[in-house]
Image: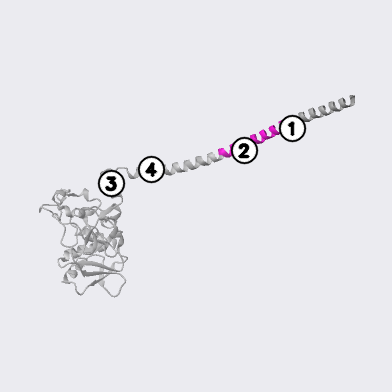
Amino acid sequence: MKKIGICFSIVLIVLIVFYFMMLSHQSKTIKTAAAANSGKEKNNKPRNLIQGHLDKKEVEVEAQIIDESHLQRSVASLSPAPKTEQKKKSNEQSLLTYEIDDGLAVIHGDLIIGEVSRDEVLKSLSGSIKEPSLRIWPTNEIPIFIQPNLPNPERVNEALAYFAGTNVHFVPYANQEDAIVFESGGGACKSYLGYIGGKQPIFLSEACSSQAIAHEIMHALGFLHEQNRTDRDEYLDIVWANIDSRFNINFEKFSSSMMKVSGLTKFDFESIMLYPPTMFSSNGQITLKSKVDGQAVAPRQGLSAKDMERINKIY
């Protein structure tokens, strides 16, 4: 009996020890699991922050795109600048109004800037263009050719005679690369401004006199209208009230950059390049009035002394 009791006690002790061992193991397992879960949470937390940062960047980028789009709409919705500012900008860009004459784009009534049928740039413009470039002829010997079908060709020879006292010499065309060609044309008498190279036309209607032809030759040599000079307001009053509004564009001024030829002398009230005092009048009254006491607007028949002086300084 005594042995049985001792064995029972040993078994009981073993069971109790085993029980506490199991409790201890379970506790460690729980702690390990908790630690593992804690580690996962720690690892997850940075990933969530990084993801959140990425999301934030995406939101910022989207917001930036929206802001730029809004800015573009805001700029587009701004009111136009005041007319005075627009006019100033236009002057800075030296924009001139052109009109179509016999298929040619023309400024100031008789200065050709291109053929509308060939020049796609002119087709896309809305009546205004930058100032043409101005080049003088590379030589003072300028070949000329008169088309056989030009009515009354003697008037061309009369116009050329006006230049006899200048350094410019007009010679017969003999297959030279460059030449001035006088040919028949509709509308007004007209010419390109300065040297353009090649066979350079001066278009003449039957109404163009020798005086008008000499005027166009001056354009071909590089000379502007006197009333379109940059400094004309110092010498002339343009009487807008008397001008037929359809011809206002003929009184636009050139910028100072275009004055390298015409600006070689002071304003010339006798120049062949100056309009008569009633030019483009709507009522027969004067359109050009002198600001200089004792000096009338009186363009000469033929070249003035200053016209010849300018030519000789250039050529």
For the N terminus, the image quarter is top right
Of badges 3 and 2, the one in the foreground is: 2
**Residue on which disc 1 sits:** 25
- Neighbours of disc 3 within 10 Å: few (<14), some (14-19), many (20+): few
- Neighbours of disc 2 within 10 Å: few (<14), some (14-19), many (20+): few
Query: Disc 1 or 4, which lies upstream in sequence?
Result: 1
Query: Disc 3 or 1, which lies upstream in sequence?
Result: 1
Chain part drawn in magenta: 27-49
Task: Say the numbered circle drawn on residue 43.
Answer: 2
Residue 186, image quadrant: bottom left
- Looking at the image, which is closer to me, 93 or 66? 66
Query: Disc 2 or 4, which lies upstream in sequence?
Result: 2
**Residue on which disc 3 sits:** 86
x, y percent for residue 30: 69, 32
Tell me the kind of residue under disc 3.
Gln
Q: Are marks 3 and 2 in contact (CB under 8 Å)?
A: no
Query: Marks 2 and 1, Cα distance to the nearest angstrom?
Result: 27 Å
